[in-house]
Image (spheres, rainbow, N blue to C red):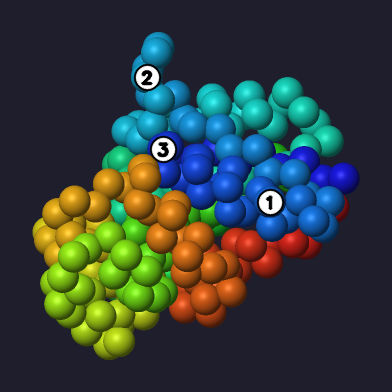
Amino acid sequence: MTRIYVLVEGQTEETFVSEILAPHYRQSGRYLTPIVVTTSPGHKGGVTRYGKVKPQIDRLCKQDAAAWVTTMFDLYALPADFPGKTDPAYKQFSNGADKADYLENRLSADIGRPRFVANLIVHEFEALLFSDIAPFATWTDDDTVLKPLRDLSASTPPEEINDSPSTAPSKRILAAVPGYQKTFHGPVIASDIGLPTIRQKCPHFSSWLDKLEGLA
């Protein structure tokens, strides 16, 4: 039995881990437990400052020395104090996966614990949903509004969709489907898409799961 604590950014990721990843990996003896980051007393969700997140990672690593700890944070809008975020080398990368790899390595070095697996989603959770736009049709009366999403999905890999404040994956989804509610629709649509398709279309995400599958 392998225990894996997944420190996640918010409720959407918590549901994704508990309802999609955990049942899948339970079959192979890997038990995933999502934990939402705490931002302040009584408040959870969002990586607003790395200074608040690092102690939580350290605490998880210490409380169960036989378990593994990993993260599921969005690359998009990470705070300036995140390890490597202000490095000149980081700013030279234009590819999201390269940026994530760099910051993951810097995060791993900063935490410095052998049973910690750094992971960032490129660029945010909603990018995974661009693996297949078809399930969105269930949540709209007029699927012609999905044309911009279909066109983008056909031309751009999900993990390469622009991460600016106006064109990030979640913003594009909301522009097409204003009723989209991340915490509810996100995990449901991801489940409808299925892990095999998401892994095929999102190689950086898939590489994280490869790492989890190699843990013992």
Residue 82 seen in render: no
Q: Find disc 3 in the rendering and name its residue.
A: 10
Badge 3 or badge 2: first in the primary sequence:
3
Q: Amino acid at mark 2?
A: His
Decide which of 150, 179 is in the foreground and name it. 179
**Side (left or right) of 4 relative to 166:** right
Counting from the top left corner in percent of width and height, residue 49 is at 35, 32
Residue at horizontal 32 percent and vertical 65 percent from the top = 138
- Residue 107 higher or lower than 136, as above or below: above
Q: Quick check: marks 2 and 1 in contact, CB under 8 Å? A: no
- Residue 56 higher or lower than 18, as above or below: above
Counting from the top left corner in percent of width and height, residue 111 is at 59, 39
**Side (left or right) of 119 relative to 27:** left
Decide which of 88, 72 is in the foreground and name it. 72
What kind of element bears circle 3?
A: loop
Residue 73 seen in render: yes
Q: Find disc 2 in the rendering and name its residue.
A: 43
Badge 2 or badge 1: first in the primary sequence:
1
Counting from the top left corner in percent of width and height, residue 9 is at 43, 40
Mark 1 packing: few (<14 Cα in 10 Å), some, or many (20+)? some
Q: Quick check: marks 3 and 2 in contact, CB under 8 Å? A: no
**Side (left or right) of 157 relative to 66:** left
Rendered image: mark on residue 23? 1
Residue at horizontal 42 percent and vertical 37 percent from the top = 11
Q: Amino acid at mark 3?
A: Gly
